[in-house]
Image (cartoon, helix red, strand yellow):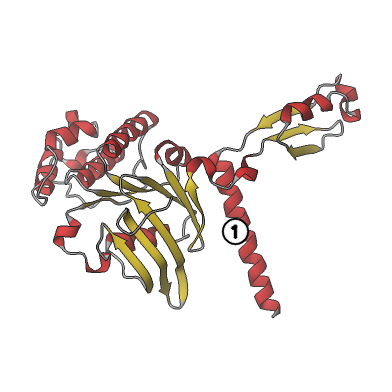
Amino acid sequence: MDMTRMDAAVRIRGLRKDYAGVAAVDGIDLDIAHGETFALLGPNGAGKSTTVEILEGYRLRTAGEVSVLGVDPARGGLDWKARIGIVLQSSGESGQFTVREQLRQFAGYYPRPRDVDEVIAAVGLERQAGTRIAKLSGGQRRRVDVALGIVGRPELLFLDEPTTGFDPEARREFWALIRRLKAEGTTILLTTHYLDEAAQLGDRAGVIIDGRLVDVGPVATLGGEEARVPIVRWRTGDGTQREVRTERPAELVASLRQAPETVDTGGEPVGLEVIRPSLEDIYLQLVHAASAGAAAHDDEEALA
């Protein structure tokens, strides 16, 4: 996605964060457009949280340029902070307030907040509005976190594992809420371990591994065309598992009926599967490839 500096809600160039001389984030370049939902994916310890915390203004970077809504987050003041919403992994709300009381308090911090009852309804907590937060279930507390993140009507919303603790129905209700926010023009940066969530909500996604972005693009194109080539799997007569990637799976399956290895089964391949790789398959391919590349690089350095 080509964007000028003025078009990007988030602009990152050469971002680096070192801890004791070790790079947790290593040279990231990224643009996120206004109104875009961008999913940042990666295994634990890959650098996702560090990157997001730098964008939120909570952590200083070692090097690089960062602009969030036209402001360097390291220098963002209260006016800038009022333009962003943050849903953290862990909750920080007071358990002694009711849901409505807590939201009213937070709404007072913003110049143009959403209606509190509208937000309560949006996250599905109408019946718990008068309940003290300490008495809510874990999933209900997570909904309070989301409500606090959106009550200020943010231009840019950071969502860090937002549906942790949600049951399947609650997750789909949350997805509908995020789509409504997107329709209103909210820019959203989502980190999630649920790849179906990234596929449902993300316009684009980036995969970060060992502090580096190894792939960025529309969710439907991650990994490139080769990663999406269908896979045909079957077992031979002696039980050996076979697997072939092919653009013509039907032709391959037809040919197996005549293969010597299917004679004993009447021409029917045993355990036959034709699979089009899912986003999860492609993501795991990227993670394994990056890990193998890093290991090979370490071996080369050790031999040098």
Q: Position of residue 56 (x, y in %)?
A: 28, 59
Q: Position of residue 74 (x, y in %)?
A: 26, 68
Q: In this view, which residue lies farthest toward the bottom?
A: 304
Where residue 267 sits, quadrant-wise, is top right
Q: Position of residue 244 (x, y in %)?
A: 75, 38
Q: Residue 98: tell me if it is visible.
A: yes
**Residue 126 horizontal side relative to residue 44, left or right:** left
Q: Please tell me which residue lies in front, 90 or 229.
A: 229
Q: Position of residue 96 (x, y in %)?
A: 13, 46
**Residue 183 horizontal side relative to residue 300, left or right:** left
Q: Residue at x 44, y 63 (%)?
A: 28
Neighbor class of circle 1 (other Cα within 10 Å; few <14, some 14-19, many 20+) is some
Helix, strand or loop at label 1? It is helix
**Residue 15 horizontal side relative to residue 274, left or right:** left
Residue with the mark numbered 1: 290
Q: Residue at x 63, y 62 (%)?
A: 293
Q: In this view, which residue lies farthest toward the top?
A: 266
Q: Residue 125: tell me if it is visible.
A: no
The quadrant of the image that shows the C terminus is bottom right
Type of residue at label 1? Ala
Above or below — where is 174 with respect to 226?
A: above
Q: Residue at x 22, y 33 (%)?
A: 122
Above or below — where is 302 with respect to 54?
A: below
Where residue 31 sits, quadrant-wise, is bottom left
**Tally of numbered discs:** 1
**Residue 257 horizontal side relative to residue 159, left or right:** right
